[in-house]
Image (cartoon, helix red, strand yellow):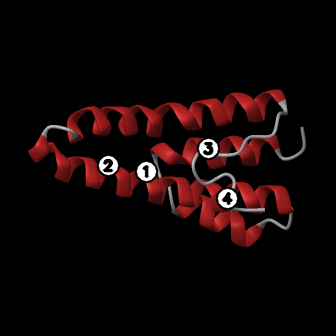
């Protein structure tokens, strides 16, 4: 349950400053777990943003519509799961990018 507040802030920042807050926390905090979570949060936002843009382009071919719905829901739900895991004290790795950072 160490640094629970920072973990919650990193996950919740997806709705108000998805890049700025995790980056500042990465620079300020010395805890390796928090640094890892900050990098994962930034990478997750970049990947989801790219997937949503690609899906928006693919709307022309109609395949992008379900993709943009899925990625939009994912961008909203995954941080909520991260907040719940942080409150309970469990470790959480973002999907897609969680295995990129060791």
Callout 4 crowding tier (Cα within 10 Å): few <14, some 14–19, many ≥20: many
Q: Please, what secondary structure does the residue beneath circle 3 have?
A: helix
SS at mark 1 in the image: helix
Mark-to-mark CA distance, 4 and 1: 15 Å
Quarter of the image where the C terminus is located: bottom right
Q: Which disc is residue 11 wearing? A: 3
Q: Which mark is residue 38?
A: 4
| Image position, residue 8 (x, y; %) | 69, 40
- Give how far apart the Cα atoms at labels 4 and 3 are: 9 Å
Cα–Cα span, label 2 and label 3: 19 Å
Residue at (12, 44) in percent of width and height: 61
Quarter holding the N terminus is top right
Instruction: Tell whether label 2 touches label 4 (CB within 8 Å).
Output: no
Q: How far from the left and from the top, in percent, is residue 70?
A: 37, 33
What separation in Å lies between label 2 and label 1 (alpha carbons)?
Answer: 6 Å
Residue at left 36%, top 52%?
51
Q: Do the residues bearing badges 2 and 1 touch, measured as CB atoms within 8 Å? A: yes
Instruction: Give the residue at x 85% y 67%.
Output: 30
Give the label on residue 52, or none.
2
Disc 3 from disc 1: Cα separation? 14 Å
Q: Quadrant of residue 88?
A: top right
The residue tagged with tag 4: helix, strand or loop?
helix
């Amino acid at each position: 349950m160490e640094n629970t507040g920072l973990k919650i802030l990193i996950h919740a920042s997806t709705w108000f400053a998805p890049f700025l807050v995790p980056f500042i926390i990465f620079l300020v905090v010395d805890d390796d777990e928090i640094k890892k979570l900050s990098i994962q949060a930034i990478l997750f936002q970049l990947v989801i943003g790219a997937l949503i843009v690609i899906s928006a382009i693919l709307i022309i071919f109609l395949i992008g519509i379900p993709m943009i719905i899925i990625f939009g829901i994912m961008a909203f739900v995954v941080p909520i799961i991260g907040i719940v895991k942080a409150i309970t004290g469990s470790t959480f790795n973002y999907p897609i990018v969680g295995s990129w950072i060791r």
